[in-house]
Amino acid sequence: MPASNSAPALLIIEPDFTGHRWRYVEWAMQAFAEAGHRCVVVTDSANHGHRLAQALAAGNYPGCKLLLATPAPDAGSGAGRLSYIRYWRVFHDMYQQACATLQPTLAVVPYADYFLYALPVLGSPFAATPWIGITMRASFHHASVGVRAPRQPVVNTAKALLFRAALRTDGLRTLLSIDPTLPQWHAGRRGGAALGYLADPSPDATGTGSTSADDARARLRLGSGPHLLVYGDVSARKGIRELVGALSGHPRAPTLVIAGVQDAETRDYLRAATSALAREPVVLDRFITETEEADLFAACDAVWLGYKGHYGMSGVLVQAYRSGKPVVATADGLIGWFCNGRELGPVLEDLSAPAIRRALDQLWPPPSPGAPSAPSPGVPGRAHLLARHTVGEFKRTLLSAAA
């Protein structure tokens, strides 16, 4: 229970600041602070050196404070060997540590998938405090809404039942999903918390409107001819092996621009394999700054989204849309769902070398009378939905969910 002399505060709880998770914390606290709330970010003490934690500690976010929680030592014992239960315990413990000095008015969980399926068994980790959360990983419903994904009927049925039960958890006010098909799947069902769509934002770019392709190419030292961007954390799931294999020996291959931190396996592969490419790739194997990101999307002619085993949303897709760049996209998952009208570029039914080469020939047709024409659109496109994927829209939706 809160201490008697505690001050009211809105809690934003996220134990992990790696990847993009700290971004959601930052956007959430900005949204609520701008609306006049006193915000406290609760995270694991191991994150004390992260730049967001440092900025909070330095007072760089007016109306927001940082609370570093001591990790629960026994969270993983017994039933805690199951990750959903372990994380439920982690969030419950962080909440209790916050309650020692604060009076929580609302808890915000930027990544509720940690413990979502434990809720029907354990209830809310936040006692009587109301809370809202964001789910980013739910995929059990994809087969029933036309998203191409692996069929796991037993697992998906079980998760659907647990999900519906989780929505009836006491204290849960609203659950938001970055997958627009999840609220569609749930539409018409009554009872429990509201389920809404939260457009997953790409960070608002700085100065991209005035970044010319020529200037960006000069800064990146790119040569002439078409350039295809592979962006983000680069691993086998990016389809990078299939892409390089398809381009090897291809006389009209674009120049690959591979930007983002590579895992060790991919790094070793690229060092050995890229020598077979007609054009030497541009490789930026490191963290990409916001300025460099803006230049990359301005300078490159198209963006690669031929991912493997990725069925969720893609921030790179949003960035490509906002930059006005065509994509070469997988037909799988939400990437395929958004791109199925082919308004954004060619869609790959598979990652075979012939399929990839045909897609690239649609973007950069060979100079011959027999060049393939771009495919006509199939079903009505969904690309327009990507216009909502801004930080401003994210903040408005989050505030509405908490009202």
Image: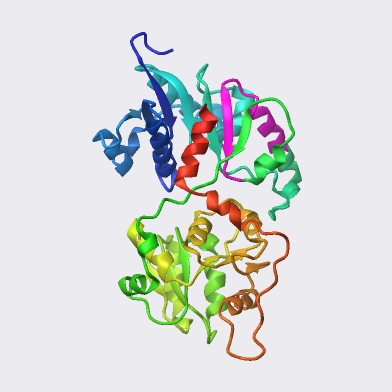
- Residue 285 in view, yes or no: no
Please state the extent of the stretch shown in magenta in the rendering.
158-179
Residue that sits furthest to the left in the current view: 58
87 vs 357: above or below: above
Of residue 63 and residue 6, the one placed in the foreground of this image is: 63
Q: Quadrant of the N terminus?
A: top left
* Residue at the spot 53% in from the left edge and 67% down from the top edge: 304
Measuring from the top left, give residue 259's x and y in whole percent.
41, 65
200 vs 371: above or below: above
* Residue at the spot 49% in from the left edge and 32% down from the top edge: 399
Of residue 131 and residue 282, the one placed in the foreground of this image is: 131
Quadrant assignment, res 300: bottom left
- Residue 224 in view, yes or no: yes
Measuring from the top left, give residue 387's x and y in whole percent.
54, 53
Residue that sits furthest to the top in the current view: 4
* Drawn side of residue 239 relative to residue 45, left or right: right
The reply to whether the magenta stretch includes residue 306 is no
The reply to whether the magenta stretch includes residue 172 is yes
6 vs 352: above or below: above
Measuring from the top left, give residue 3's x and y in whole percent.
37, 11
Residue that sits furthest to the bottom in the current view: 368
* Residue at the spot 56% in from the left edge and 53% down from the top edge: 386
Of residue 202 and residue 244, the one placed in the foreground of this image is: 202
Measuring from the top left, give residue 235's x and y in whole percent.
49, 61
Total marks shown come to 0
